Amino acid sequence: MAEPAAPGELPQTGDTPEYWEQHWDRFSEATRLNPAQGFRRNLIFHLLGTSAEQSGATLLDVGCGSGDQLAALGHRYPEARLAGIDRSRTGLAVTARNFLDALLLPADLEDDTSIPKPLQNWASHAVCSEVLEHLDDPVAALRNLKSYLQPGGRLVITVPGGPKSAFDRSIGHQRHYTSDHIKRDLQSAGYEVEIAAGAGFPTFNLYRLVVLMRGDNLNDDIAGRPSFAARTAMAIFRLLLKFWFFNTPWGWQIVALARKPK
């Protein structure tokens, strides 16, 4: 268990609720500038496909954080109804200030008693991006997530692959995945898996190597207003991350598309 933080300090690891109550205030700007965010959104849009554009589509962002992804989903699918859940009320408050057109509710994905009634069997599509690596029991969380989906509902997953960085460990990454690993977890949770793949080689892998090399210094690089060097590096990688391969055994971004059985 993590040591308690001194007053005014951020808890040192992401395995406590207190950490996430402060995380979005400290790293919200870096999250917005992070080139991996846009890269993942392109992957998510690709996997959602045109079905999310259909009349009556309902999109759920699982672990919506500070709302950047919800805003991107709303821009891409303007006709869809949107909702977001997160266990961090601070993150939900940030989202509510910046994005008023979604139903936002607190929920703990690992607690099957905390599923909000308005969202039971609600989503035709759900996105769970960079969440499962933080959880004690991701298979149980995936089972609970089925309660949010309509029969036949589509679930898009992104999880990290490759080695863990010091920053990954500091924010509570308990595991990194392979495509086979996420496929097994989804099948164990009762989903029909359509795609499980590695993506991003070579440019995303290069970005991750830079993160690995910064080690513990990365927390200081990106806390609050990111440093000039960090902002410059992120701008360069926003350009480079237009060039990558979707399905290779070497990609360090793991993605999956699954369905709740009808």
Image (cartoon, rainbow, N blue to C red):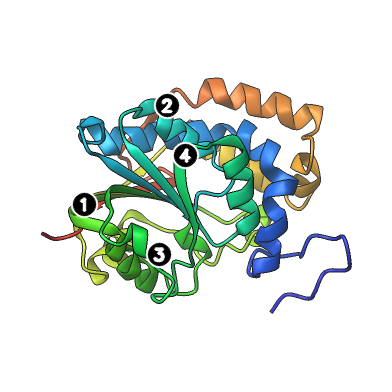
Distance in Å between CA atoms under marks 4 and 3:
18 Å
Residue 54 position (above or below residue 112):
above
The image shows residue 12 at horizontal and vertical percentages of 76, 64
Marks 1/2 in contact by CB < 8 Å: the verdict is: no
Q: To which residue does mark 4 refer?
A: 70
Q: Is residue 225 something one can see in this rendering?
A: yes
Which numbered disc covers residue 75? 2
Crowd band around label 4 with a 10 angstrom C-alpha radius: few (<14), some (14–19), many (20+): many
Q: To which residue does mark 1 refer?
A: 153
Looking at the rendered image, the quarter that the C terminus falls into is bottom left
Pick out the residue farthest to the right: 7
Residue type (three-letter) at the residue carrying disc 4: Leu
Pick whichever, 219 or 113, lies toward us: 113
Distance in Å between CA atoms under marks 1 and 2:
21 Å
- Residue at the image position 70 percent from the left and 63 percent from the top: 19
Residue type (three-letter) at the residue carrying disc 3: Pro
Pick whichever, 237 or 50, lies toward us: 50
Q: To which residue does mark 3 refer?
A: 116
Crowd band around label 2 with a 10 angstrom C-alpha radius: few (<14), some (14–19), many (20+): few
Label 2 vs 3, first from the N-terminus: 2
Label 4 vs 1, first from the N-terminus: 4
Marks 3/1 in contact by CB < 8 Å: the verdict is: no
Distance in Å between CA atoms under marks 2 and 4:
9 Å
Crowd band around label 1 with a 10 angstrom C-alpha radius: few (<14), some (14–19), many (20+): many
Residue 113 position (above or below residue 254):
below
- Residue at the image position 25 percent from the left and 71 percent from the top: 188
Q: Secondary structure at mark 4?
A: helix
Residue type (three-letter) at the residue carrying disc 2: His
Q: For marks 2 and 3, give the one nearer the viewer.
A: 3
- Residue at the image position 76 percent from the left and 65 percent from the top: 11
